[in-house]
Image: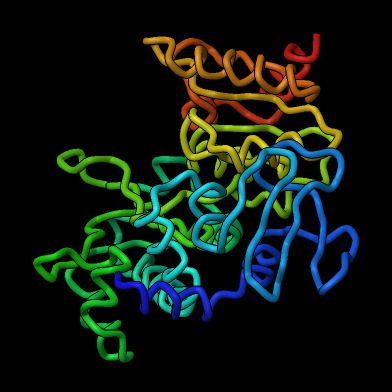
Amino acid sequence: MNRQALDDLKQQIPLMGYLQAHAWQPARPLSRGRWMGLCPLHEDHQPSFLVDPTKDLFYCYGCGRGGDVIRFAEIYHQVRFSQAVVLLRQWHGAEPLMQETSRFYRVQLHRHSEAVAYLYQRGVRSVELIDHMQIGYAPGGCLRSWLTQLGHSLPVLRQAGLVTDTGYDAYVRRIVFPLEGNLYGRSVSPAAPPHRFLPGAKGGLYSWAQVQSYPEVILVEGLFDYAVLWEAGFHNVTCSLGTHLNARQFRQLCDGTRTVYVAFDADGNGSGQQAAQYLLRNLQERGTPARLVSLPEGHDPNSFFVQGGDAREFHRLLEEARL
């Protein structure tokens, strides 16, 4: 992008609006229309984050970082400059596109028996859960046609990652879960890579707004782990979409008084449990109580329930973690 295009993007996305859309709240006003609040870029206990809406600039007296809305997106989402620009453009203009894409995929779900069968195999069996997670299905070969009929240009679809450079649907034979500004696609075919995201950040913890008020939170790796726990009645569950939390997800876990129960995979190579132990240490160093949920060897929460485990047995695992 040239300088004029960058300036236009920054004019279209006022810094204050972007901050408030990401849950930042000013704590007190200063002179000349400026505001001070807690810094969203690091753990902050006293307001040190200065925002000047007139100049569309920020500066943190705590961590020493500052700049414009693009610089904020770089640091906040932990991406490079070019990726931050893509994220901001998607955030500004892609919300209707993502909503239309998700709605299209949800319509496709019940038209394809292989998708319904795959969900049943993974323990996703209730309409309530499917509606709650807004689960859809990407058969491939038809999204591009639908979205161009709605007026979205091919370059826009390519930039969003919904269509490949050669013009084909990017998601083919995938169960699709809408995320915050992204889509996760899980392949139903063993021949394809299992996981796929659109370009950009994976966002914060899954369904965090519905979970953050609970005094105890269960953290799992994957969305199918989340699904079976939610269906079993554990509505205080959230998901990090992998074992490595980004800075925003870690801050979310630490932003209140709560105990975190980490229920990562007990896989044979030990990587899930190693990641869980590492996360536990970091949470405890920040003063957040954390417990390790010890699943049977070789299981993740999804396989635990799919292969006969129930809510009572999982409650017992939580009780054991409290000891």
**Does residue 117 appear to the left or right of 25 in the view shown?**
left
Question: Position of 237 compared to 45: left or right?
Answer: left
Q: Please report the residue visible at 60 percent of the width from the left and 24 percent of the height from the top.
A: 263
Q: Is residue 117 visible?
A: no
Q: Which residue is drawn at 70% across and 72% down?
A: 53
Q: In which quarter of the image is residue 218?
A: top right
Give the x, y percent position of residue 214.
82, 41
**Residue drawn 65% across and 41% down?**
64
The quarter of the image holding the N terminus is: bottom left
**Looking at the image, residue 157 lies above or below residue 273:** below
The residue lying furthest to the front in this view is: 32
**In this figure, what is the number of numbered marks?**
0
Q: Which residue is drawn at 78% across and 39% down?
A: 44
Image quadrant where residue 190 sits: top left
Q: Where is residue 285 in the image (x, y as percent from the top left)?
A: 73, 17
Position of residue 195 relative to residue 293, above or below, is below
* Relative to 193, residue 52 above or below: below
In the picture as drawn, the residue positioned furthest to the right comes out as 28
The quadrant of the image that shows the C terminus is top right
Q: Which of 261 and 277 is in front in this view?
A: 277
Q: Where is residue 184 in the image (x, y as percent from the top left)?
A: 40, 52
- Percent across and percent down for residue 15 are 62, 68
Q: In this view, does 288 lie to the left or right of 202?
A: right
Can the viewer see residue 172 in this picture? yes
Report the coloring of the rendering.
rainbow
Residue sticking out furthest to the left: 166
110 left or right of 169 in image: right
